[in-house]
Amino acid sequence: MRRALGFSLIELLIVVAIILIIAAIAVPSYLRARMEANEAAAVSGLRTINTAQVTYSSAYSTVGFAATLTALGGSSCNPPSATSACMIDTVLANGSKTGYSFGLTNVTGTPAAAYQLFGTPLTWNVTGTRYFCSYQDAVVRFSLTTITTCDASVPSLN
């Protein structure tokens, strides 16, 4: 009597069960790592905008800080202007990048000497769990709840 070649049904089911167990362990770790990468990219975006604000304020001293993200960005940069400075990329200037939305508010003074910058996860607990903010001191701050006013009472990231 000859033995049949191949795998039995029970052997295939065991292999599938092992693959599913490994996937059940790996997927949450992958999602957490992706969320942490989104948060790191959001912090990097805030730092980029802070640097651009300082540069913009120096370049356009009669204007002060930029009132909008689009003024820091821009697509026609020949030559750059106060409304299209081309200091940040166009994706960041549109206000949304890597799972976070960015907003620039409370630009006050003539020339503008104050601003508040916010980074909010697009989908909480999917793209990120922390809210970030910064203002003219350029220190990135964070909270686990929504930030409405960014000041020294919000703990710094470092």
Image (cartoon, helix red, strand yellow):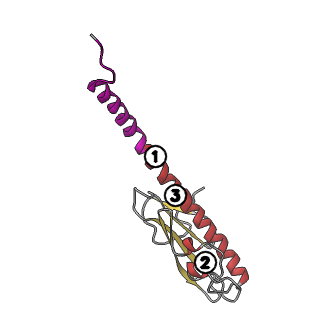
| Tag 3 residue | 39
Relative to 22, 83 lies left or right: right
Q: Which residues are magenta?
A: 2-28
Q: How far across and how far down the image is residue 111, in percent?
A: 65, 88
Q: CA distance from mark 1 to mark 3?
A: 14 Å
Within 10 angstroms of label 1, few (less than 14), some, or many (20 or more) residues? Answer: few
Residue 15 in which image quadrant: top left
Q: In terms of depth relative to the viewer, which is nearer, 149 or 39?
A: 39
Sequence-wise, the earlier of marks 1 and 2 is: 1
**Above or below, 4 relative to 102:** above
**Above or below, 158 relative to 146:** above
Relative to 95, 49 lies left or right: right
Q: In terms of depth relative to the viewer, which is nearer, 128 or 85?
A: 85
Residue 30: which numbered mark, if any? 1
| Tag 2 residue | 73
**Above or below, 152 relative to 55:** above
Q: In terms of depth relative to the viewer, which is nearer, 64 or 55?
A: 55
Which residue is found at the position 50% from the left and 52% from the top?
36
Is 70 magenta? The answer is no
Which residue is found at the position 66% from the left and 84% from the top?
64
Q: Amino acid at mark 3?
A: Glu
Sequence-wise, the earlier of marks 3 and 2 is: 3
Q: What secondary structure is marked by label 1?
A: helix
